[in-house]
Image (tube, rainbow, N blue to C red):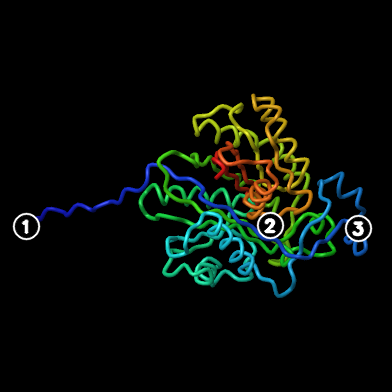
Amino acid sequence: MSRERPALRLRQGAAATRVLGVGSTQPDRIVTNDDLSRIMDTTDQWIRERVGIVERRFAAEDELLVDMAVTAGAKALADAGTDPSEVDTVIVPNCTMPSPIPNAAGQVADRIGIKAAGAFDLNAACAGFCYGLGVASDLIRAGSANKVLVIGAEKLTDVVDPTDRANAIIFADAAGAVLVGPSDEPGIGPVAWGSAGDLVDTIYMRDHKYIHQEGQSVFRWATTQIAPVALRAVELAGLQPSDVDVLIPHQANLRIVEAIAKRLRAKGAREDMVVADDIKYSGNTSSASIPLALDHMRAAGTVRSGDVVLIVGFGAGLSYAGQVVICP
């Protein structure tokens, strides 16, 4: 005798989402190009010409990825005027946790005071923040979460050979966070994401210890393939390139950033579109770089509340993602 199968009930979330607050942190230790020239065969001019970096921040040995994530996350909550008790999910995009378990997110949530939160890490390397933001937005719209804290955090000095000038001049440590919540009007556009798994060998962990990348291959890929991803994000949001006020690509290399901006302007982006150049004084901080740049630009007044901000991340995997965000 058959019986009628019970129907499952689904939750329905908010119609739209937005960024409610932003926060970031960097270590105190500033490392200049001249500092690096004392321990490897390089010069200030050589570094500036190739990657555009003037200085970067290195964490102390006892300063952990989780420590930086806690600081950045707490600042994002304070910026939003939100109590930790209101947050139900924490996502920590990163690729530099010392071990796969325990994850960073659960520890970070507890230390901030977010109890019994859904908490998980996400590894899409330098595209991680955009991936995390896309997941957070969709969780809220599906009704699976109400407010989600997304924290890109990296301690790259743990996984960079200090004698490898190709990488040691680029990477640095930091954390950047945003709080995402429900909204009546869309403040976060659909994510445009993907991967190029056939190029996985261009960035990988050498001997399971140090980052290795084929610099020229990555440069060619990023300068030709990422602008179309950014334009797709604009299209998915129902906008035109001319609507974009601010462009914040992953801060991988100033030449890559400038190449992406040039391609967007050739497709209709405005000449007065502000382009993030946080790479100059922060270095490449992987999943932290986009929220870090956004926080710095808000503090400097180069991005203002209500601005249309186009973000796009790209890196190992090779993974990429981008979306349009309204600045809080």
Q: Which residue is mark 3?
A: 34
User: Which label is found at residue 274?
Assistant: none
Q: Position of residue 315 (x, y in %)?
A: 66, 49
Q: Looking at the rendering, in which quadrant would you find the N terminus?
A: bottom left
Tally of marks: 3
- Measured Cα–Cα span from mark 3 to mark 2: 28 Å
Q: Dot 2, how many residues are within 10 Å of its Cα: few (below 14), some (14-19), or many (20+)?
A: some
- Measured Cα–Cα span from mark 3 to mark 1: 81 Å
Q: Is residue 118 left or right of residue 128?
A: left
Circles 3 and 1: CB atoms closer than 8 Å: no
Q: Amino acid at mark 1?
A: Met
Q: Which residue is mark 2?
A: 204
Is 234 placed above or below 64 here?
above
Q: Position of residue 312 (x, y in %)?
A: 61, 42
Q: Is residue 312 left or right of residue 207?
A: left
Q: Dot 1, how many residues are within 10 Å of its Cα: few (below 14), some (14-19), or many (20+)?
A: few
| Mark nearer the N terminus (1 vs 2) | 1
Q: Which residue is mark 1?
A: 1
Instruction: Label 2: state its secondary structure.
Output: strand
In the image, which is nearer the foreground, mark 1 or mark 2? 2
Is 142 placed above or below 74 here?
above
Q: Position of residue 44 (x, y in %)?
A: 91, 52
Circles 1 and 2: CB atoms closer than 8 Å: no
Which residue is painted at 78% across and 40% down in the image? 255
Q: Amino acid at mark 3?
A: Asp
